[in-house]
Image (cartoon, rainbow, N blue to C red):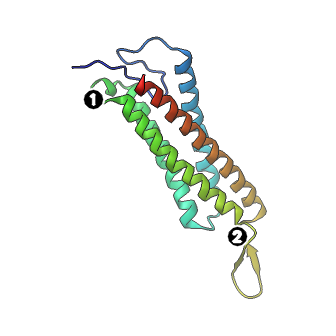
Amino acid sequence: MESYSVLCPCACVAGPAQTPVSGLNFISSSVFLSLQLFGTIVWILVASTRVPLPLLQGWVMFVAVTAWFLSIVFLCIFLFGYANRIAVNWNQTDFLFHGATFVFYFGAFLLQAATTSLHHLPRKFNSTTQEKILADHEYNISIAASIFAFATAVCYGCSTALALRRWRL
């Protein structure tokens, strides 16, 4: 049976063959905490507005909530020691998870930015009143959601690069 190093995605919990905390583990922990924080902010910002385009912003919410939840599950697997009981190459699993999540989050960022860019289009309720798709306050919230979705995608990209480095080294 081969021995491999088990690294937590946040690298704050050591597996049996891991060396003490290094600079790379600190960076990985910082990236993990950042993506959880930014992902939570995206979730809150999108949920705090009226959803003018449910198809676009529904996907953004799905990605934000699912990625946040799965990241917490992934962290708990390591915190409670289940990683030592399950015979899986966790470095490869970490890379695949963060790589797929990066792709989904980048797509969510593009959809959120597209929703934001359509703010000036009128929403016609009847022939006498016209209202913008996003009110000014919602437009500002949507801009913030787009920025934080991009920041979260960048954090998942960095986490993917770190996971690839752990997996291949």
Taking depth in this image into account, of 80 and 84 the one nearest to the observer is 84
Lower sequence index among marks 1 and 2:
1
State the residue at coordinates (60%, 38%). Answer: 37
112 relative position to 58: left or right: right
Q: Distance between the residues labelled 1 and 2?
A: 49 Å
State the residue at coordinates (77%, 82%). Answer: 129
In the picture, the quarter occupied by the C terminus is top left
- Label 1 belongs to which residue? 86
Rendered view: 37 above or below 17: below
Q: Is mark 1 on a helix, strand or loop?
A: loop
Residue 78 point in image, percent of width and height: 39, 27
Residue 83, picture quadrant:
top left
Rendered view: 94 above or below 56: above
Give the class, few, some or many, for how many residues have Cα within 10 Å of label 2's Cα (few <14, many ≥20). many
In the picture, the quarter occupied by the N terminus is top left
What amino acid type should be assigned to the residue bearing mark 2?
Ile
For the view shown, which residue lies furthest in the top direction? 20
Rendered view: 115 above or below 71: below
Q: Residue 133 carries which label?
A: 2
